[in-house]
Structure formats: C-alpha cells, structure tokens
Amino acid sequence: MRRLMTTRRLGLIAVAIFSWFANARDGLCSGSRPAPNIVIIYADDLGYGDVSCFNVKRGKITTPHIDQLAKQGMRFTDGHSSSGVCSPSRYTILTGRYHWRTRLQSGIVGLWGPPLIAPDRLTVAGLLKAEGYQTSCVGKWHLGWDWPIPPKHKALFRGAKTAVADDRHRDAWREAFSKPIAGGPITRGFDEYFGTDVPNWPPYCFIENDRTVGVPTEFLPARLFQNNQASQQGPALNGWTLEPILPTLGARASEFITRAAKTDKPFFLFMPLTSPHTPLAVNKEWRGKSGLNLYADFVMETDSVIGTVLKAIDESGVTDNTLVVFTSDNGCAPYIGAAELEKKGHFPSGPLRGYKSDAWDGGHRVPLIVRWPGKVEAGSICEQLVHQADLIATCAEIVGAGLADNAGEDSVSLLPLLSGVDEPVRTTAVSQSIRGLLSVRKDDWKLIFGRGSGGWTKGNDAHPAQLYDLASDLGETTNLYLEKPDLVQELTILMTSIVDNGRSTPGAKQKNDVQVKWRRFLAIPKKGRAVP
C-alpha cells in the first residue's frame, strides 16, 4: 500500500531514476537507433471499464484488438486525463499543461469557439516536427478554430433541429467555407489534418487541413437528432450521414501510416477518435453485436477500427520501431444507457465511482496502454500514478529534446516506467470536473475541493470537501475529510502551490493565462488547523 512519501524516499527514487537515465538512454532512445514512429490513439468517452482487459470482473463488451495491444505492451491501471470532459483533456495531452491554466476553467470549447491552444504554445506535434517528424492529426479536434464567420452572420450558423436552409444561409455559408479556417491543427504543429471538428456538431462535413471538404448547403435533417445522434443544428453537406465518419477516419489514418512509412523520416500520428462518443452512428455490421445496447455495439466497432490502424502499422513493416499509445479523453457518458448496461452486468466505469463529467475517478481515470516492441515488456502492468500530461515530456526524452520552462509545465517523462522501473515518476496529479471542481492526488490520497461529483452524477456529502484513501477505497465510498484535517491541509497547500507556481514540475515559475478561481471550492476542516 503506497502512502505519502517521505522526502528521503523521494530523494532515493530521484537518484535511482537519474541512474536509470544515465545507464539506459543509449538503449532506449539514443541517436544510434532510428527515432521511433509514435502513434497516439485517443478514444472519446470510452470508460475505464469498457475495455475487457481493464474490467475482467464487471465487463461484458469484447475488445479484442485493444486487449491484444495490452498483451503486447504495458497496461497502466492508474492513468488519468485532465478533465471529466473533452476539450480540456485534449489540450493537456497535446501541451503537457493542465487546461485550467487557460481560459477554460470549466466546460468545453463551445460551438464555433476560438482556439484554446495559444499560437506560441509548444505541442507534442510541434516538438516532434522540430525533430524531423512527419506529423498528422486524423479525427476529432474540438480545440477551437478562428472560424471565418462575420459577427453579423453568426445567427445563420445555428438553428432549431427542424430548421430549413434558405438563400440567406447558403450565401453566408458559401462566403465562410470558401475561405481557409485559421487556428486549427496545421497551425499547432501538425503538417496535415483530416477529420470532423466535433461529429455531433456543425459543420457537418469533413475538414482537410484548413478547408472544409465541400461547402455545406443544408441544415442537418431533423431525424438525425434522435436517439443519441447529432446534438447541435448547423450547416451540413447535402446528404451527410453519420455512420461513415468512423470508418473514414480509420482509412485515412491507415493511409497516412502507409505513406509515411515509405519515407526515411519518422512519423507522428495523433488519432483522436470520434467514438464511442455520440453520435452513436453504428454501422449495420456492428448493430446488435454486443447483445447489450447501441453504445456497446459502438465500442466494438471502435475496437475494430483500432485494429485496422494497428494492421496498417504491421503491414507497413514498422511495428518494431513504432511506439503506440492508446487511451481515452474521459469516462463513459451516463446518458448512453449506462444504467441499462449496469443492469445487464456491464459497468462502464468498472470498480470506479462516477462517469464522464465527474471529479470522481469514473470521470477521469481512463484506459492507458503503451506498446513499444523491444523496449516495453509485453504483458506488463504498471500501477504507478500517471497522467496524460506526461506525453510531451516522454516524447522529448525519446528524441533527446529539452523542454523550455514555458513548455510542458505539468509533464513528467514515463520512460523509467516503460523500461520496467517500478517507482513513482510523479506523486501528484490534478483532474477537474465539467463544472470546475478540482481534485488533487498525492500518492494514494485524493482530495476533492467540494461536495458531490462536480458533474452529472448525483451524490452528495454532508462535508464541504472529500478525502479518499484510494489504496483501500478505490470506489471513493468513505469520506475521511473530518478524520484527517492535517492531511486535508497538506493537500490544500499542495494544490495552492501547483496553481500559484504555474507548474507542478521543477523549473522556473510560470504564469497561468488567467486567474485560476479554484478557491470558490476551498473547504475549511472543522477541526485541526485552518486551511490557508
């Protein structure tokens, strides 16, 4: 059972990790070996318990391709996203910086919202591009663009679900979508992009690089807003349907891998899937396959598309020199029939409490698998605390690049863990609910700075904050807030430092983009010393 670590033990661990780097770097990522290709597959709304190998006792969905990936690599059981919802987690995995240091203090990037990643902010793609990588993003962006929509026309880009387009709409859409869309992936480190910004939001078309593929001329048909399909009305291509989106992304990702593997340059593919997030646009081949519900069918179809991408890696002959990371942006959404699934014996959050949007672990503890043949032991399991913010520092270590003080402020390299070192590389981690409720981890202790889930899952507590011992209470059932006021104070001081320093890793103090107003959730213990 891991506890709060002493300064002496942390010092010994630091020495061990430094020694590992000194002795093992040549074997893992030296210039004498070709730089590895890196593929990140980022599922959308896939719960911790939706993957078979993460939920053996309480899972009913078969995910053979993801399970096979785990057999070939390392499975992390304590991996976390930055948030219980979409956009913030995407910001953090690409930048290595907690999203709440930006304007996004709660919620997500809204419809037609501006870019969340600042133009001068280093991303994983920008880092690797500078090191000679070909960089591609295929899938869901949802981090904002500088949409070329004049303020006077904004109302024409929204509508009721039964809306019918007229000449005013078509003229405004033609004017906007005949122009480049600035501020997207190809301005944030990616050489190329193909995807749908948000599959259940407009524009209902694909975007390639900085242009829509075709110009929308209609509103989406009202029938496509039923049964967890589309959710926001707006411009759509004539005849646009939702089912082809996922397989098209699989095909485009495979095409990039095949093309890039034929060159003498390493490649980086970031594939943020649109699934199993709504729209639950399951293709005929997969409908009813799970025997559970449409969401479960969609998970199985998602697994199949992941298999397609992994097959492209194999058939391109680059498997042995390709690092593959698979994970999800947050937990499963409760509105896709989670209660129905639980009655049938499938628990999308596995042993965890809560769902998408929540500060409880069901909101942000996610599946995480890393495969790197010859470097990462096949079939291994890591129980150490890790975070999606760690991607950029890990990639920097792999390619031998340094990170400036104003890059990857919350990122820690996972290379020691990937090599089999079973000691913490990070002891703290922060995640947030959709409404801005922060939680901080220190070893196995977790403090949530407020009542309830902070999201959509019902549940409250008489105490003003929540303290859980995850080593003995993974389901977050016993609130120890009153019993351990000194620990509450220690974790609150820790959170204060993480916020005020603009970083959670060693380095020069940085500024947050805005004032982080997290103290509105701050709790004062009823006994012991007061929290500052």
Image: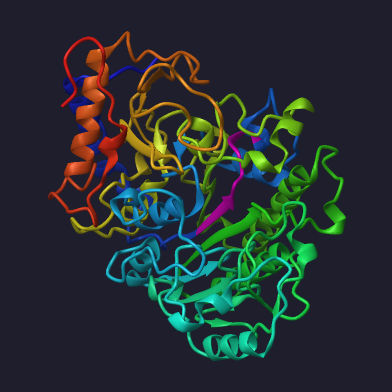
Q: Is residue 532 left or right of residue 114?
A: left
Q: Is residue 51 left or right of residue 133?
A: right
Count of numbered marks: 0
Q: Residue at x 28, y 19 (%)?
A: 4
- As for residue 42 lying within the magenta part, the answer is yes
Give how far across and how far down residue 453 sits, in percent. Answer: 48, 31
Give how far across and how far down residue 153 sits, in percent. Answer: 51, 82
**Relative to 44, is 147 above or below?**
below
**Relative to 436, is 13 above or below?**
above
Split into 4 quadrants, where in the image is the N terminus?
Answer: top left
Q: How is the image coloured?
A: rainbow
Split into 4 quadrants, where in the image is the C terminus?
Answer: top left
Point out the stretch of residues depicted in magenta. Answer: 39-49
Give how far across and how far down residue 397 sits, in percent. Answer: 31, 53
**Relative to 522, is 184 above or below?**
below
Classify residue 175 by image quadrant. bottom right
The answer to which of 484 and 194 lies nearer the viewer is 484
